[in-house]
Image: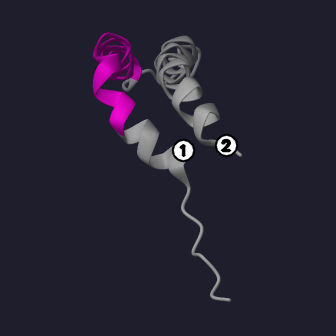
Amino acid sequence: MAEEELVDLKKYLEDACKPKCLKPLIEYEACVKRVEGDDTVSKHCTGQYFDYFSCVDKCVAPKLFAKLK
């Protein structure tokens, strides 16, 4: 019996979902641009980062769990 090569569907589903989350991505990139010159390291874009990946995860989850055995 030949072994099937396992493929991580999550990566492919994330790539497909990222274009659907443009607004959070634009907000994150704008934040990064605003704080990249901050020498005090007190400003960060953690909230925008999590908003973006939360959007991606909400898109991926139903598609991924439907394919699990």
Q: Residue at x 65, y 82 (%)?
A: 3
Judging from the image, what secondary structure is the residue with disc 1 in?
helix
Quarter-of-image position of residue 32: top left
Q: Quadrant of the N terminus?
A: bottom right
Which residue is label 2 attached to?
68
* Residue 62 placement (x, y as % from top left): 57, 24
The residue sitting at 54% across, 44% down in the picture is 10
Residue 57 appears left or right of 35: right
Q: Amino acid at mark 1?
A: Lys
Q: Nearer the viewer, mark 1 or mark 2?
A: 2
Q: In terms of depth relative to the viewer, which is nearer, 41 or 53?
A: 53
Residue 33 inside the magenta-drawn segment: yes
Q: 10 Å neighbourhood of mark 2: few (<14), some, or many (≥20)?
A: few
Report how far apart the C-alphas of labels 1 and 2 lie in the structure.
Answer: 11 Å
Q: Which residues are magenta?
A: 16-35
Residue 25 numbered mark, or none: none
Residue most extreme to the front: 1
Q: Is residue 62 above or below residue 5?
A: above
Q: Main secondary structure of the magenta part?
A: helix
Q: Amino acid at mark 2?
A: Leu
x then y, percent, for residue 69: 71, 46
